[in-house]
Amino acid sequence: MPSRSEKRKGEADLHVHTAFSDGVLLPEKVVEKALGLGLRAIAVTDHDCVDGIAPSVSAAEGTTLEIIPGVEISAAAGDREIHVLGYFIEPRDPGLLKTLQKMKHNRMVRMRGILANLKKRGVSVDEDKVFANSGEGTLGRMHLARVLKEEGVVRNTWEAFDKFLGDGRPCHIKHKRLDYRKCIELILGAGGVPVLAHPATMGSDEYIPAYISAGLRGIEAYHSKHRPSASRKYCRMCGELGLIATGGSDCHGVAGWTGEIMLGKVTVPYGVVENLREEAVKVRGSRERLSVNSDK
Ligand code: AMP
Ligand code: FE
Ligand code: FE
Ligand code: ZN
């Protein structure tokens, strides 16, 4: 099977971050770069935030690029953190917006805790600088890592995670995460198609049957951190379980210390977008049937 990163023109990158979460590129720049690569579609999938969708759609208006409204929500499966992608969500869905707003508040409280942990270790960082770095969107550890680099505390963001912020490192505080069932329900409620993000990096495969029972419709088989053997495994799994195999670069603007722009490095044929769109129609159909039944 060819690696999905070999092709790109006319294809779709279904996992892209903007500056509305921890990506560095504004939606306009992401759109410009995607057009330059000849992509036919990208999904804007910011962490716990949908505010980057409208500016991306505006920037792509009148061009050949399609913007798929998406989101990447952090959730918990037992003691594991997982990420669930939601495709073709309605970005103005009140239930979704309410939960994302709550998550935004929790992230601010968490960041203050992480800053207090740093202070105990003799590293003082101006809270406003970190908040300014995240702008309007989702505040995360990457924003703090960038400030630590700017202030000369660390040489690069990798070192910030390695020394202080990474999972299990001294200053890390876990998110207050949504239970995976609530997370999947939230995406379905917003008319979206829930897809398990980069499973090879999360190590929660034994939960996949439970995710499916909760309403999961796909698995991100192709991802920049998936080896070809992992992609083959998840593709096979999708075939056996009747799920949609998706893929994307998980571009955050610039990657690590190489400075490489990942956009379009992992793509899937446009047919996958059509499958997701059809699935979203089914999700909305069953959601409407459910609400008609509950009226009775
Ligand atoms: P948060 O949502 O605040 O927990 O931060 C998660 C984000 O931080 C991920 O999406 C990555 O962009 C980044 N990240 C997490 N762990 C690392 C790590 N060890 N090295 C580099 N970036 C990381
Ligand atoms: Fe990220
Ligand atoms: Fe993720
Ligand atoms: Zn991502």
Image (cartoon, rainbow, N blue to C red):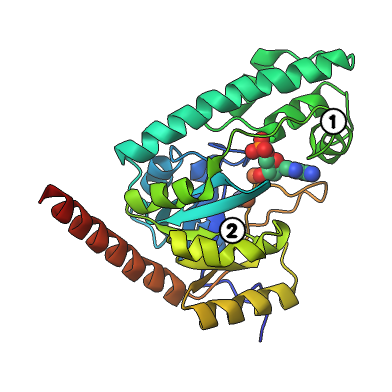
Quarter-of-image position of residue 219: bottom right
Local crowd at mark 2 within 10 Å, few (<14), some, or many (≥20)?
A: many
- Which residue corresponds to mark 1? 164
Picture residue at 83% right of the left edge, 41% below the top: 158
* Lower position in the chain sequence, tag 1 or tag 2: 1
Mark 1: which amino acid? Phe
Q: Is residue 213 left or right of residue 6?
A: left
Q: Is mark 1 within 8 Å of ligand 1?
A: no
Residue 128 at x, y percent in the picture: 65, 14
Which secondary structure, mark 2?
loop
> Looking at the image, which is closer to me, 168 or 22?
168
Q: Is mark 2 within 8 Å of ligand 3?
A: yes
Residue 108 at x, y percent in the picture: 59, 22
Mark 2: which amino acid? Ala
Picture residue at 48% right of the left edge, 38% below the top: 49
Residue 287 at x, y percent in the picture: 25, 56
Local crowd at mark 1 within 10 Å, few (<14), some, or many (≥20)?
A: some
Residue 142 vs 108, above or below: the answer is: below
Q: Quadrant of the N terminus?
A: bottom right
> Looking at the image, which is closer to me, 40 or 221?
221
- Which residue corresponds to mark 2? 197
Residue 225 visible in rendering: yes
Residue 266 visible in rendering: no
